[in-house]
């Protein structure tokens, strides 16, 4: 009996081994899979077309070796800002220099004008000269000339003061030119009167 | 350069030798472009993916250690580039883990043009798995890793792809 039981046990073990063996993917099955793969591959390879890729080497090369910009956008921004600042500074200095030069010119010009006017005041004493030389002031109509001249000189002095106070050179220079013309006319008239 | 063995070509590419890089591109561009088209990409998109893929290939070639073949390595990079350009839609299917591998249908003698037409009519996911498994000899594990799907999904996709293709060809 014992021997029969042992045999049964052994038989059971063998059956279990066989079942395990049978349920495992067999060599045959793997062969079938390989064959299936080969068959499908061959069929698909034969049927499906191959394609030629368009030439994109230059683009790829650009992608691998991108051109480095000389300046990064950040550096470029700073550079632009620096240039703007320098330009502004240069322009400011130029204008400052120009204004200064202009002001100096104006003052020099004005001083000359005033000096000339002051010298010209000598003309105011010309009546004395006329008297000394027996020339009548009435004949020469010197009185009216004196009055006009005094006014011109006064204007010139006022101008000089205004320039000192307000520094409006352009406006005053224009006025000065007008006065200068007036003065020239006055002198011309005076000389004409004297010589006539 | 055309006769240069692949190992030497790769070594030169690692040194950023431009003529070697061009040679590697010339050797594999058509195969990789064909793969992209077979996966259902439009030619313009495939062209873009190929360009992007090659840029990545040459930028990361120093990491290539030769464990796998150079083509397999380049293909993995291209597939990543393709998945960036195009979302490959995997249709939900049953998980037939073993079925796909046990199916060994013998193929009828299909007409070449008909097979081509039927292949083009397959959904993108089916086309992709069919291409990668049969034409690129990739395992389901590799396919799963590239497409970010499970191995089981890859197997069931393949099974359904074959069924669909067979159905289309019988119509």
Image: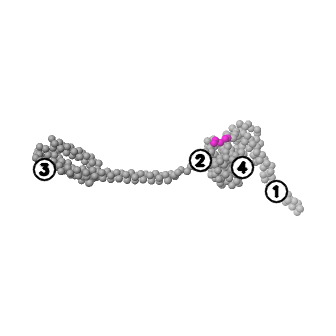
> Which residue in the structure is indicated by mark 2?
A62
Q: Which mark is residue A4?
A: none
Is A54 magenta? The answer is: yes
Looking at the image, is mark 1 or mark 2 earlier in the sequence? 1
Residue A25, horizontal then vertical, whole percent? 78, 51
Left or right: residue A115 compared with residue B86: left
Distance of mark 4 from mark 2, alpha carbons? 26 Å
Q: Residue B5 carries which label?
A: 4
Tell which subunit mark 4 falls on. Answer: B
Select label 3 or label 4 by which is in front: 3
Identify the element where label 1 is drawn: helix
Select label 1 or label 2 by which is in front: 2
**In the image, farthest residue toward the bottom:** A2
Tell which subunit mark 3 falls on. Answer: A
> Which residue in the structure is indicated by mark 1?
A17
Is disc 4 on the same chain as disc 3?
A: no
> Which residue in the structure is indicated by mark 3?
A128
Q: In which quarter of the image is the N terminus of chain A?
A: bottom right
Say above or below: B89 vs B112: below
Left or right: residue A51 compared with residue A167: right
Q: Nearer the viewer, residue A128 or B21?
A: A128
Q: Which residue is drawn at 61% across and 46% down?
A: A60
4 and 2 marks in contact (CB < 8 Å): no
Is disc 2 on the same chain as disc 4?
A: no
Identify the element where label 3 is drawn: helix
Region in magenta: A51-55
Residue A110, horizontal then vertical, whole percent? 26, 51
Check disc 2: other Cα within 10 Å, few if <14, some if 14-19, many if 20+: few
Distance of mark 4 from mark 1, alpha carbons? 51 Å
Say above or below: A182 vs A75: above
Distance of mark 2 from mark 3, alpha carbons? 99 Å
């Amino acid at each position: 009996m014992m021997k029969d039981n042992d045999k049964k046990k052994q038989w059971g073990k063998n059956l279990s081994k066989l079942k395990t063996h049978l349920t495992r993917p067999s060599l045959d099955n793997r062969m079938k899979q390989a064959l299936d793969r080969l068959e499908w591959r061959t069929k698909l390879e034969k049927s499906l077309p191959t394609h030629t890729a368009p030439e994109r080497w230059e683009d790829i090369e650009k992608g691998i070796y991108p051109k480095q910009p000389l300046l990064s956008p950040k550096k470029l921004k700073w550079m632009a800002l620096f240039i703007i600042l320098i330009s502004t500074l240069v322009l400011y200095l130029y204008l400052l220099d120009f204004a200064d030069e202009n002001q100096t010119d104006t003052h020099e010009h004005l001083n000359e004008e005033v000096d000339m006017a002051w010298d010209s005041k000598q003309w105011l004493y010309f009546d004395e000269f006329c008297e000394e030389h027996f020339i009548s002031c009435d004949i020469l109509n010197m009185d009216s000339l004196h009055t006009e001249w005094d006014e011109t000189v006064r204007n010139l002095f006022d101008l000089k003061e205004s320039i000192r106070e307000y520094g409006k050179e352009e406006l005053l220079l224009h006025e000065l030119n007008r006065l200068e013309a007036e003065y020239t006319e006055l002198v011309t008239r005076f000389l004409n009167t004297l010589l006539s | 350069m055309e006769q240069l063995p692949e190992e030497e070509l790769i070594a030169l590419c690692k040194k950023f030798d431009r003529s070697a890089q061009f040679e590697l591109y010339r050797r594999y561009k058509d195969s990789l472009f064909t793969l992209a088209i077979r996966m259902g990409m439009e030619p313009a998109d495939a062209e873009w993916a190929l360009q992007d893929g090659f840029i990545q290939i040459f930028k990361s070639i120093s990491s290539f250690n030769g464990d796998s073949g150079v083509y397999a390595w380049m293909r993995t990079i291209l597939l990543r580039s393709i998945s960036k350009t195009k979302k490959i839609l995997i249709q939900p299917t049953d998980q037939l883990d073993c079925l796909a591998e046990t199916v060994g249908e013998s193929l009828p003698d299909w007409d070449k043009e008909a097979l081509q037409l039927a292949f083009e009519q397959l959904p993108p996911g089916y086309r992709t798995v069919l291409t990668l498994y049969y034409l690129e000899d990739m395992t389901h594990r590799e396919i799963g890793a590239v497409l970010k799907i499970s191995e089981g999904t890859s197997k069931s996709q393949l099974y359904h792809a074959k069924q669909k293709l067979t159905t289309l060809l019988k119509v």
